[in-house]
Amino acid sequence: MRILVTGGAGFIGSNLVHYLLETHADAHVVTLDALTYAGNLANLDGLPDPSRHTFVKGDICSDEDVARAFEGGIDVVFHLAAESHVDRSILDGRAFVMTNVVGTQVLVDHLRRQGQGRFVHVSTDEVYGSLGPTGVFVETTPLDPTSPYSASKTASDLLVLAAVKTHGLDAVVTRCSNNYGPMQFPEKLIPLMICNAMNDEPLPVYGDGKQVRDWIHVRDHCSALDAVRLRGATGEVYNIGGVGGERENIEIVTAILTALDKPESLIRYVEDRPAHDRRYAICSDKTIALGWQGEYDLERGLGETVRWYRDNQAWWEAIKSGAYLQYYEQQYGNRLR
Ligand code: NAD
Ligand code: TYD
């Protein structure tokens, strides 16, 4: 089985590459990644069997780069490459439209031309917009994105679903809640708070800190993606959420401070994010019906994650110093295709 993972040097993509190589002895994984600021080749260190992995440095918007990744044929595409940070999209949305929308169409076109193969489009619960104090997102909840990030993901979902109808593409769409775990770039809430707390730096909490997210450990997301790949029905959407993972942001921040034995005086309430979604909550029943079950409750997962950042300080210090950006040339020079 030849599997293409786009965005495989990012947070979820790299966890997925590790997961696939660990769980499928017959899998060869090709990673296609442009190594933007969010891509880090160090995330692909320590793969269980590096001979079953090929790294292709390239942009999903480039036909030439995507063609290189498809060389030798691809049975499954897990599409994760994206601009993924809401705050960056508010500052400048253009790269989000290019990668998330145009890039998705380029990949769809290549798979279609190949004539066979399954496309797993990895999307987000943020396409549904914001919930009030009650209720959950189901797959038929109306799409109502509120940021350039979520709007671009919504557009990409619709392009993939249209390709199923127009061209008979064998595609499934997944919409997952907020992920956490090892190798998450320290601009997102949980790793940012852990790294700042470890450095005794202020922890910026947006608005009143009472926004709710439904946290899922990245490993559970990976197993769900594989279940959808294996048993999901073409043209269907599958929601993926955490195991009892709903928490207010301020609860997450204080739990991190407690785990690190740091004072709450590090918390700084700052100006709120514009159009800040108040609450996300996911009904995963349709994915659970495929035989998937999440394994990490938040207490266990958050504890392990705090330990990972404590044990891997060099990983995030290289990001803070910018040294990780030189990793590709140092390690591989021009040896990779
Ligand atoms: P990330 O920002 O950590 O990683 C994105 C990766 O994509 C990086 O390695 C980057 O180099 C690569 N990339 C960006 N533009 C590219 C391009 N034009 N061509 C090739 N590669 C490119 O993101 P993540 O948090 O791992 O998210 C992965 C996917 O999962 C995204 O599609 C995101 O929308 C989705 N998702 C994320 C979450 C979450 O909580 N992080 C939740 C649900 C869904
Ligand atoms: P984030 O990790 O950016 O994910 P998303 O916006 O995709 O849900 O943010 C998670 C929540 O944490 C969100 O409600 C915004 C909030 N937040 C802060 O309060 N402070 C911060 O510094 C960051 C990055 C996020």
Image (cartoon, grey):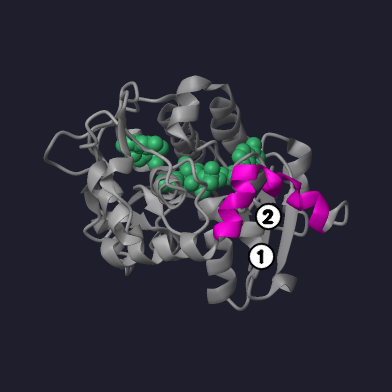
Residue 284: x percent and y percent? Answer: 27, 55
Q: Residue furthest bottom?
A: 25
Q: Is mark 2 within 8 Å of ligand 1?
A: no
**Residue name at image x 14 percent, y 42 percent:** 135
Q: Secondary structure at mark 2?
A: helix
Q: Nearer the viewer, residue 197 or 55?
A: 197
Q: Residue furthest left?
A: 134
Disc number for residue 45: 1
Query: Image height check: is 299 above or below 236?
Result: below
* Amino acid identity at mark 2: Leu
Residue 263: x percent and y percent? Answer: 29, 49
The residue that disc 2 covers is: 41
Quadrant containing ligand 2 reads top left
- Residue 218 seen in render: yes
Q: Secondary structure at mark 1?
A: loop
Q: Is residue 36 left or right of residue 130?
A: right
Majority secondary structure in the magenta region: helix
* Amino acid identity at mark 1: Asp
Q: Give how far apart the Cα atoms at labels 2 and 1 are.
A: 7 Å
Dot 1: few (<14), some (14–19), or many (≥20) neighbours within 10 Å?
few
Residue 3: x percent and y percent? Answer: 62, 61
- Residue 232 is drawn in which quadrant? bottom left
**Residue name at image x 28 percent, y 61 percent:** 298
Mark 2 and mark 1 residues within 8 Å of each other at the beta carbon: yes
Q: Is mark 1 within 8 Å of ligand 1?
A: no
Q: Magenta segment, which residues?
A: 313-331
Query: Image height check: is 3 above or below 58?
Result: below
